[in-house]
Image: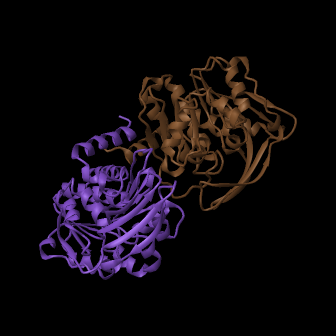
Chain colours: A brown, B purple
Amino acid sequence: MSLLVVGSVAFDAIQTPYGKVDRILGGAATYFSLAASFFTDVQVVGVVGTDFSEKEEQVFRAHGIDISGIVRENGKSFFWAGEYGENVNEAKTLDTQLGVFAAFNPQIPLQYRKSQYLFLANIDPVLQVNVRKQMNGAKFVGGDTMNFWITGKPEELAEMLKTVDALLINDTEAKMLAKDASLPRAAQKILKLGPKALVIKHGEYGATVFFQDGAFGIGRHPFRAPTLPIEVVTDPTGAGDSFAGGFMGYIASQDKLTREVFKRAMFYGGVMGSFAVEDFGTERLQKLTREEIEERYKTFRELTHID
Amino acid sequence: MSLLVVGSVAFDAIQTPYGKVDRILGGAATYFSLAASFFTDVQVVGVVGTDFSEKEEQVFRAHGIDISGIVRENGKSFFWAGEYGENVNEAKTLDTQLGVFAAFNPQIPLQYRKSQYLFLANIDPVLQVNVRKQMNGAKFVGGDTMNFWITGKPEELAEMLKTVDALLINDTEAKMLAKDASLPRAAQKILKLGPKALVIKHGEYGATVFFQDGAFGIGRHPFRAPTLPIEVVTDPTGAGDSFAGGFMGYIASQDKLTREVFKRAMFYGGVMGSFAVEDFGTERLQKLTREEIEERYKTFRELTHID
């Protein structure tokens, strides 16, 4: 089944202990759609400036991603510059230029509205709710958010949380959202705010999915997926969005919400995140093959399964 | 096969967000031996003062633990007072009184010297090396250490690392020991210092075992075990020692060093650590049954296994 993502398409400047790039294709919807494209048909709604060229379009098209929902406006694309130190879990933002993204007000093209699977990447929760309303026939909706909205637009975010089936955030965001220093307790509090499933990403330690009691008819027991212990994390940018792409892409490909599907989706999420960090920007995802994905999936199994 | 542990037997005063105890049985060798006693015969070498009474002895004896190697000296037992805040991973030490432990110079009783499995709990690496020499027939030796020895006695610790088959430490200790902020890289560096297996405990995220290439004939692929997402961590004291007890106890019970045994040992380590934190001191371990252990082992499997 086709999967629609709404979010940022951008250019990034990134510096890590392993190198530096001045201008590379980025943005949550970019990482997400590339990762998801290995599993299902993907459509993107976003906005770019006149600096978004045929070269960038080709990255999406080479993976069969439908970008007819990416609007081109006069001005510059969203630009982010960041730096990572020894701690790859923390990015230091050096520059943010919203450009045409500042006025982003996503309108879902009619031909996308029948999509059953939707991912609301990290944008203003007001826009996320607006998109959700346009996609009111969706069967399964995932969403992301960040500290900026948790502290800056708590009421709007509360509305958004009521409209998603799965929320995908990281440890820090979960603790901040629930105002609780205990992650398992924070998870239970967040589930009471709306999402039937809550995926908390632990960076290098993997991710855990928690469920509302009885959600999807699959019981409340959580499930943990690993990541690889990777010695060289070339560029952590986009790892979380790639996780979300693998997770949502796999679920959309199976078109059923069983516990087995969620488990495998968690593994595929981890697999896609682990590939994303191996090179700058989306370089690794661009070159990836489905065979490599399956091979790493097996490695993840061997890393965690007793027999 | 019988398992010998050498380490501290102590009294603790502990304060956590869930309560307070003024004087409770503690010490690394205590947690370790209780946890290991569910899997194999355990012997303890340690030192206590005249305040160590029949009541404390009974805790060990009730679990069939051989404490004829615990020497009683004139003076007070080792005493530690600590406090945990919202972050259960960090203890604040309020008081340390070494007492008779200050002059601890472990001599292994002759009847213990034929033990094939040995655990060097966290004590001065000079003493650890000395014990290792007395136990030179041991088949598999595990060891622990801490920041105090990593920074204070690096050369002595380097000697100790050459004499253990498995080192069990936490994330912070591993990064400090290897002088590397990347955990997977730190792991590879530490394996070059001696241990054939390195178990890094990630607190609430579980633990990973790394192997030297070709160690035990089982290949170098790491293995990750989870912990439960526990909403109420009543008292984190002893979680790491209980992990070590479950890990070493299970290996000793199987008396073979296969990849399957290591995997299960990692799970049993996680299981014992997850029980230890449910109540103050060793209270939960004291009341535990093997049936509860097997039940939680199954829960750990369900938490991580796809099918």
Q: Which of the pair B248/B53 is nearer the observer?
A: B53
Q: Is residue B126 left or right of residue A4?
A: left
Image coordinates of residue B54 in percent, x first then y, are 19, 66
Q: Is residue A100 left or right of residue A305?
A: right
Q: Which of the pair B230/B187 is nearer the observer?
A: B230
Q: Is residue A267 left or right of residue A40?
A: left
Q: Which residue is depicted at the point 80% across and 40% down?
A: A77
Image coordinates of residue A250 in percent, x first then y, are 51, 31
Asked whether residue A97 is in view, the answer is yes
Q: Which of the pair A49/B2 is nearer the observer?
A: B2
- Vertical position of residue B119 compared to residue A165: above or below: below
Residue A127 figure quarter: top right
Q: Which of the pair B236/B4 is nearer the observer?
A: B236
Q: Which residue is depicted at the point 84% across and 37% down?
A: A50
Image coordinates of residue A148 in percent, x first then y, are 70, 44
The N terminus of chain B lies in quadrant: bottom left
Image coordinates of residue A34 in percent, x first then y, are 62, 37
